[in-house]
Every structure is written in structure tokens, then in C-alpha cells.
Image: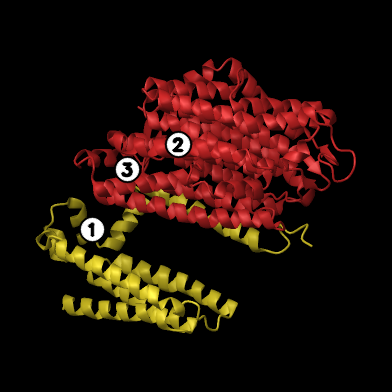
Chain colours: A yellow, B red
Amino acid sequence: METVAFFYFAAVIVLTAVLVVAFRNPIYSVIALLVMFFHVAGLFVTLHAEFLAAVQIVVYAGAILVLYLFVVMLLNLKQDDSYQRQVGWGIGLGIVGLAEMIYLVLSAQVGNSPAIGTAALQASASPKVAAIVTRGNTEAIGYMLYTKYLFPFEVASLILLVAMIGAILLAKKGVLGMKEP
Amino acid sequence: MIPFSPGDLLAILPELIVMGVGCLLLVIDPLTAEDRKERLVYISLAALAVAFIAQYWLLGLRRPVFSGLYVLDPYGTFWKLLLILVAGLVILLAKAHLKLEAIDLGEFNAFILLSLSGMMVMVSGRDLLVIYLGLELMSISLYIMAGFKRFERRSMEASAKYFILGSLSSGILLYGISLLYGRTGSTMLSGIKAGLAGLPPHDPILLLAMILLVVGFGFKVSAVPFHMWTPDVYEGAPTSVTAYLAVASKAASFAAFVRVFMEALGGVKANWQVLLLIVSIATMVLGNVVAIVQTNIKRMLAYSSIAHAGYALIGLVVADAAGVAGVMLYLALYAFMTLGAFTVVTMLRKGGLEGDEIEDFTGLARRNKWAALLMLLFMISLTGIPPTAGFIGKLYIFMAAVGAHLTWLAVLAVIFAAVSAYFYLRIIMVMYMREPGETAGTPGHNVRIVASPAIIAVLLVAAAGVLVLGIFPDPLVKAAQSAILP
């Protein structure tokens, strides 16, 4: 069952990833990217990383992709052929990458790779991992964020505050443009 | 489980004050009438004074905070005291300077405080994640401040360039951090040190992680070959921001750089010393040589700050107690002279603009002997001629190099310090040996000096730092030597 799911998600990811660069209309590309992000999230679910899957959808599909769409629509990009001419380069680099991957897969010690799945995780000796499996990883991450990592968590919130205010300050007309002609 | 104790909060009291007042300023700013905006400056200065006292009160204490993610130690306290002082001086400087440039916004003070809190987190983090978050908080505030002159093309260019290259370097740093985490199973500096013990010394992934960390931090301290952004950003940013960038951002980045490499990677010194040796030499050579051909004073000071990063890096190449103390001393003394030099630049006005060309200094001694005299002092100090602070900084760095049997490196650094005399002394020559132009189009024409009590106060502190610490450096040397990493 897991294998079937994996191959389904993997196939769709590869297909849509190719479509992202192959489409000439940027809107189609963005939609293909959206489909890809959902399937990557599906892949995370098969690995029992539910939290990561949710973050993948919320952050990538929800926030980043909407940003892309905004940019594409605001700039009113109809069609951009300049990248289509680089197909030769793309194929060349793709072959190099593929060769490298095949080499790595062949030279890796297959016996050493850990089995994937809840049972394997529970069997592993680390008590941390066991705690995560029994508690569910969303809860485990939330617990860590608000206890041990409380301080960095708060610093991160300050970063977001600064970035937000800075963006408004630099983009808003009339705030800093007192001498603007 | 209670995540922290009241003692933890007390240990980060200075940080909490700076962060809290930084956020508070953002709220107070819109509620303050336009003609009372000066209040914000006084509030921030008061907050910095309280934070400084609180930090001084914590001097000498050593205590892990937030289950070891953060630390209160003499090393961090030394840097934090320096950074708070610099931030206070920059706020004073900006008070007068931003008004001249018509960009005096209340948010500026908030950004200074928030970036200062980022720096404080950075120098005290004992976990790579915390250090990274501090670095990002500092950098994002600086990206925005660099673009404060929004109507000026150069300022926007500086902001955009700094943002894009800075994000790239953050990405590289994170890549290094993730590789280290993958190899050692920890992001805590102590955990990495323990994890490294079980690895072969020439582990390829470890080496790659090390290189990526050097690139990431090298960018922040503007070491060659990661210095490309420095001249453009320093030139385009408002001069008071440039001063903050050149002094505080560099000091904080060096502090984190030294802590990560000494505490986490100290066990595999031999691997990174050679790498940093090459970077250090390249930085000294390029910084000093390219500075010679600059015609803009801010660009020249940018290359000079690159060169000084090269000298300070020698301390990290040496990587022993004397080297670390040397870096701390060097950056602390460098802060006074660079801040002073940039302050003199802000005083020079040409019509409604800033006189930021070297030409504008022509005959300054005739127009205003005090400004020229102070610039003379800062230039002499930057060259490293006794009895100024610059000499003491170089002396201790070179002594550390000689002590570690790197005499040839010290000799090389002295040679390049001599090269640097050419472009520093040129400013003095231009100020004292030329007559200011009387007709339009001649160098030095129409330049005037604008001074205000705030700027004079900054200049006095900087000059006092350069002279007093140049003649009587003992207290600072002792402070640095007692604050080195364990």
C-alpha cells in the first residue's frame, strides 16, 4: 500500500515539475507547481510526517504560491519565451544530474538504509523518537516550541514583526518620500 | 515542565529591556505629535542606558540560560556592553543627521533597538539556531535601515543589494548549519563539539559544513571574497546607518564567528585555520589596495573596514586565548575610530547634500579646524600610529600572531598597514595642505560644516575613546583578557 502511494505521488511530482518549466503561460506553471506541492505533502504523510505535510500545504501552497500568483498577475506576464531557448542547457545539466544520482544510488550500501515506517521508528532505541511516535509529531513539535525552544520562538516572532513593519515603511508612499520629486 | 526559571529572565534582562522598548517605540511613534518626535530619541537612549547598567551588573557572571540554548558569560557581556554603547552613539548621531537628510522617522530608533537585540542574541547564543535567528533579526533591520533614503537611487540600490546578497549568505550559512546538524546530531555548540569527537578529522561533510560557515560569517564581516556588497551598501545607506553597519554589525558578526568556531569547532582547529589564513590575507591585501583608488570617502572607509576585518581575522587564525582577546580588543577599539570618521562625514554638507567625496575635504582645516583635527586623529588611528587606539589594537593582534609562531603573517599585516597609510594620510593631506576652492566647480567649494550638540557629543566620546584607550589601554585589555571563552 505504501509503495503504491509512494509511486503515485512520486510520478505526479515528476510530471508536474516538468510541466512547471514546460508551460509557456506562467499561470499554468504556477497551477502545476501547486499540484506538485500537494503531492509532496502527500509524500510526507506516507513518511508519517503529518506536521511537515501540513506545513508544506500551509506555507508553500497557501502563502508562497499565492505570492507567486500575485506577482504574475500584477506584472501581467503573458508569455516569456526567453527560457525556452535554454532547453539544450537544461537537458545537458539534467543528464549530468541523473548520472550523479544513479551513481550515488548504486554506490550506496543498500543494507545500511533504515527501514521506514512507524514500526521501525518505534523499534529504534532512541527514547526521543519513541516519544514522538506515541504522542504524534505535531504535538511533540508544539511541546518543544513552547518549552525548550521558547526563547528562539519569540525571537523569530520579532523577526517577522521587523520584516512586516519594514516592508510597509519602504513601500508606503509619503512615509519616506518627503523629498520625492 | 517549566521551561525557564526567574533567574533565566534576569540573566537576559538587558535583552528584554532592549526588545521591549524597541516594540514599545513602534506603538508610541504614531501617538506622538510630529513636533515631539525627539521624545522617542530620549526614550531609546534611556532604555539603552538602563540596559547598559543591567548588563554591567551582570558582568562576570556565567550561567546557561533556557536549558543551554543561550548563555550569560563574560564573553557575551563584553560584546553586549560594546554594542549597547555603539547603538547609543549611533542614535545620537542619527538624531541630527536624519533631520538634515529629511528622513527622521520615529521607526528608526525602534529598528536600531531591535537590530541591537538581534546582535545581543547573536553574541550570546550557544545554539546555532539561536545564533542564526539573532543574525537574521539584526540583518533584516539593517536591510530596511539601508534603504531609508527611499527617494535616492543609491540608497534603494544599497538596500536591495544588501537584502538579496544577505539572504543568499544566510542560505549558505543555514546549509552549513544543517550539514553540521546532520553529521553531529546537535545544533548546540557543546553538542557539536561532543559529536565531532567521534568523527574522523577529515570527514568530507564536516569540511564542507565548515567552508559554508566561513562563507556565511565571512559575508557578514565582509571578508574577501565575500565583500562585494560592502562598498555599494556603505556608500548608498544613510551615513549614520553606514556607521552602525561598519561598527556594530561587524562586531556582532565577529563575536558569533569566534564563538561558533572556538566553542563548537575548536577541536578541529587545524581544519579551518588554513582556510581563515587565506581569507585573512586576501582581505588585508584587497581591502588596502583597492581603498587607494577610491574617490568617495564612504567607499574608501568601506574598503578600510574590509581591511580591518582582515586584521581582526588574524586573531581567529591564531585561535588561542591571546587571539580571541586580540579580536575583542581590536573590534572594540576599531568601533571608536570608525564611528568617529563616519560622524565627521555626516557633518560635511555640500548645498543640501552630503559631502561624501574625498574632494569635499579639500582645505577643511581652513574652514573648521576642529573638524579637521578630529578627522586627523581618526585617520591616524585607523592607520595604526601610536599613541592612538588603532595602534594598540594592531599591537595585540600582531603579538598574538607572533606568539603562535605566525611571525610572517604579522610582518605581512604590518606591510599592509603601511600601505593603508597612503590613503588615510591622503585625507589629512587634502584637508591641511590645500586651499579650499573659492569658485564654483573647484574642489572644496561650497562645503560647510554642520554641527549640533548631539554630533559633538558623539565626536567627543569617539575622540576620547581613541586617545584615552590609545594611551591607557590597560582596563580594556584586562576586560578583554578576562572575558575570553573558556
Q: Is residue B305 visible?
A: no
Residue annotated with mark 2: B280
Residue sitting nearer the eye, B36 or B103: B103
Residue B447, position in %: x, y? Answer: 83, 40
Q: Amino acid at mark 3?
A: Met
Gap between marks 2 and 3 measured at Cα: 27 Å
Toward which corner of the image does residue A130 lie, by quadrant?
bottom left
Q: Secondary structure at mark 3?
A: loop
The structure residue drawn at horizontal position 84% and vertical position 42%, both measured from the top left corner, is: B442
Q: Amino acid at mark 1?
A: Ile
Quadrant holding the C terminus of chain B: top left
Gap between marks 1 and 2 measured at Cα: 45 Å
Which label sits in the foreground, 2 or 3? 2
The structure residue drawn at horizontal position 20% and vertical position 65%, both measured from the top left corner, is: A103
The chain that hosts pointer 1 is A
The structure residue drawn at horizontal position 9% and vertical position 61%, both measured from the top left corner, is: A111
In the drawing, does residue B335 fall left or right of residue B194? Answer: right
Which label sits in the foreground, 3 or 1? 3
Taking the view exactly as shown, the residue that stands out farthest to the right is B439
Determine contact: label 2, label 3, CB under 8 Å: no
Q: Is residue B440 above or below residue B421?
A: below
Residue annotated with mark 1: A132
N-terminal label among 2 and 3: 3
The chain that hosts pointer 2 is B
Graded by Cα atoms within 10 Å as few (under 14), some (14 to 19) or many (20 or more), the crowding at tag 1 reads: some
Q: Is residue B451 visible?
A: yes
Residue B158, position in %: x, y? Answer: 61, 53
Residue annotated with mark 3: B188
Determine contact: label 1, label 2, CB under 8 Å: no
The chain that hosts pointer 3 is B
Q: Secondary structure at mark 2?
A: helix
In the drawing, does residue B163 fall left or right of residue B30? Answer: left
